Image: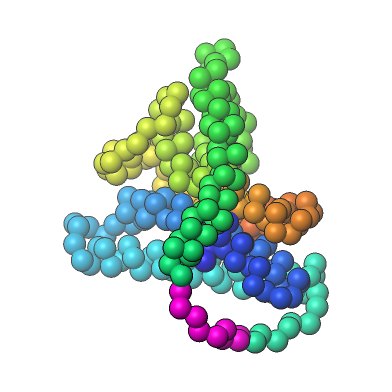
Amino acid sequence: MGFGCNAVGVTGCRIIDSPRERLLAMLTNSLIPCNGRFPLLIALLTMFFAVGASGFGNSFFIALLLCLFILLSVFMTFVLTKILSKTLLKGLPSSFVLELPPYRRPQFCRVILRSLCDKAFFVLRRAVAVAAPAGAVIWLLANVNIAGSSLLSLCAGFLDPFARFLGLDGVILLAFILALPANEIVLPLIIMIYLSQGSLTEYSDLSAVRQLLLENGWTWVTAVCTMLFSLMHWPCSTTILTVYKESGSLKWTLAAIALPALCGILCCFVFNSLAALFYG
């Protein structure tokens, strides 16, 4: 379920009887790319790894690369689950029994009403609770200047040295931090900071976006590291609130934030180091 929305995936962990295994599923759910991360992955694959003119062969190659990234994220959930089950969440695995309930005629009106009010509205309310103040913070950072530079540029410059070790730059890392309310705005934030604009800009022409990224020092290594970090970084605000609601523990909520972020930092550092070693 995390492929659609990680917050819904965390909510779906309720069906797991074992508290230990329920925690394992919640802590690793955000490693699965949700719908909010696919636009960035597809855009970067198209801009930096297209093999020529548009056509079936090119589309197939991009789709194949996307599948490989998805398989990597699934593999990382297995790795992290194995590590957690041997360290923080030791215990014997429980048996899995799936019982089919007695068949009943579905009550469509009741199902639709419950899904809309009890599920969708509940998740959207959590998203709005964080999105509104986060939007105000982004606007202030983009429009408040100190010594001729916006706060966004100053923050990006502060993060740049650390981000370089990960194959990124300060702008990319800052965009991921500010995109806490929604992963969909990572690329618009990157464009906004590079252009020193005070509001988000939507680009329909990927060639123009690619040219902007290249002018700001992007290479294929930067694109790969950005995609790796998109796959493995802290969950969005809605997912964080859902983890806290479902676990009832601040400790495990912080673990759900830190664990995928550490995976992303490690993977980006290793890939960037190998790329620097073999490609200089």
Please say whether residue 268 is visible from this viewpoint: no
The foreground one among 234 and 274 is 234
The residue located at (52%, 25%) in the rendering is 139
Depicted 132 relative to depicted 68: above or below: above
- Quadrant position of residue 133: top right
Q: Which residues are magenta?
A: 98-106
Tell me if residue 99 is in the magenta stretch.
yes
User: In the image, is 21 to the left or to the right of 200?
Assistant: right
Residue 127 picture location, percent across and down: 56, 44
Relative to 16, 231 lies left or right = left
Q: How is the image coloured?
A: rainbow
Which residue is located at x 46 percent, y 41 percent? 185
Q: Is residue 71 visible?
A: yes
- Indicate left or right for 236 with 192 as reference: right
Query: In percent of the image, x 57 and y 51: which residue is there?
Result: 122
Q: Is residue 266 magenta?
A: no
Considering depth in this image, is 204 or 222 the residue closer to the camera?
A: 204
Identify which residue, 254 or 111, lies in the foreground. 111
Give me the residue at 52% from left, 60% from top. Answer: 114
Vertical placement of 109 versus 190: above or below?
below
**Residue 183, image x, y percentages:** 50, 47
Q: Is residue 144 above or below residue 124?
A: above
Across and down, in percent, residue 237 comes to 60, 46
